[in-house]
Amino acid sequence: MLIEVFGPGCAKCQVLEKHAHQAVEQSGGNHQVVKVADYAAMAARGILSTPALALDGHIKFQGKVASSDEILALLKG
Amino acid sequence: MLETDAVVPTALEPNTPPPSFFRRGGWLLLALPLWVLLYAVIQRASELIAFDWLGLMPKSHLGEAVAFFFYDAPKVLLLLTLVVFIVTFIQSFVSPTRVRDALSKRREGVGNAMAALFGILTPFCSCSAVPLFIGFLRAGVPLGVTFSFLVAAPMINEVALGMLFAMFGWKIALLYAGTGVSIAFLSGLVLGRMNMERHLEGWVQDALKAPSLGEVEEERMTLPLRIELAIQGVKEIVGKVWPYILAGICIGALIHGYVPESFMASLLGKHSWYSVPLAVLVGVPLYSNAAGVMPIVEALLGKGAALGSTLAFMMSVIGLSLPETVILRKVMRPRLIAACVGVVALGIMLVGYLFNAIL
């Protein structure tokens, strides 16, 4: 699956990105983590607060640093 | 058929709280009496530490400063924990998406008032300022209304409001909220009339016209989830701001122990015309968390600084910060930034003079 982490590069966004990588490692699956720092791209996707995370193009949450367990649960779907 | 029957009981599962919630709930029940107990003993404990253990003289400069530190540090941290818990819990009912949808159909005036009121409660992190700004404009929220929100959200900090209420009573808390809402309302109204749309950066104007690629669905909230969020909020905020608080308390302790009242009265007193602009000038470059300013406010008021000047100082520290201005520079051209900072600074000074005059 494709995991997109949206954030301009603030501390919270970096933590979320780290959690996403940890979740991928734990899942053992073949997932890809992409960081999106472009404000225009965030605006087009309807994101109002950062950090946000999308799974296969669907925004799962915004304005929150999810734990790696939460992201893992999303990956297992 | 059999399969769907089997699915029914599990479908109820998301509504039953996870087991960790009960463990947490038990901790919460224990935490409250512990909190009350600690809060009851800190006054006595601070005097014990400063005057008995450290052997400092009561009424001496150093003694009073040290006692202030050992009294204020636990007090502010305890109050902050409680305030953040309550505030984060309430915030779980107000999301930026909901605010945006509520504001998108409003005209100026009503919209500005609503935006300023929403600004009190909305969780706001300065790195979200840009996506929020563009998202509001894209949804058809007028620029002036968006400004009212952007001014209110950082200036009327919900944690500061709770701390003011806990430390100085409801009158000062209401004063702070009321003046903050008025400044946000008026500055949004003024900026909205100045036709500033062309002073947005080019890429922002493009982003406003770009087609939408999707919308964010709201997360479904349950009570255990809200409580969990509140606990996380306490961990995150208290864990992050305690250095600011200790720094604030050190400054507060120095003021409390060493600054003579006559000096403070002439510097920030209600009869010196320069006290309000001075408070704003000192406050703007200072960047502190809302909770970190509280001990300084406490010490200033204790030494006879005028309420208007002190409020002006607090608002400029919290509401007008350089880091935020730097972030907003990405979307606004210098003229717009200058207008924005200028209008807000003017509003804060008006408030300072007003309260110095009437109180």
Image: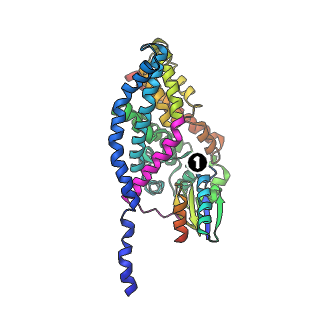
Q: Is residue B37 left or right of residue B155?
A: left
Residue B210, image quadrant: bottom right
Q: Position of residue B23 (x, y in %)?
A: 38, 55
Q: Is residue B297 above or below residue B128?
A: above
Residue B87 on the magenta span: no
Of the pair B175 and B301, the residue shown nearer to us: B301
Q: Position of residue B337 (x, y in %)?
A: 61, 40
Residue name at image x 36 percent, y 33 percent: B39
Of the pair B123 and B56, the residue shown nearer to us: B56
Quick one: which residue is furthest to the bottom in this view? B1
The chain letter under disc 1 is B
- Quarter holding the N terminus of chain A? bottom right
Q: Is residue B305 visible?
A: no
Q: Is residue B98 above or below residue B86?
A: below
Residue name at image x 55 percent, y 65 percent: A72
Q: Disc 1 marks which residue?
A: B127
Q: Is residue B256 left or right of residue B358?
A: right
Of the pair B31 and B48, the residue shown nearer to us: B48
Query: How many marks overall?
Result: 1
Q: Position of residue B227 (x, y in %)?
A: 39, 53
Q: Is residue B229 left or right of residue B125?
A: left
User: What range is drawn magenta here?
Assistant: B214-243
Q: Is residue B102 visible?
A: yes
Q: In the rendered structure, which amino acid carries the disc numbered 1?
A: Cys
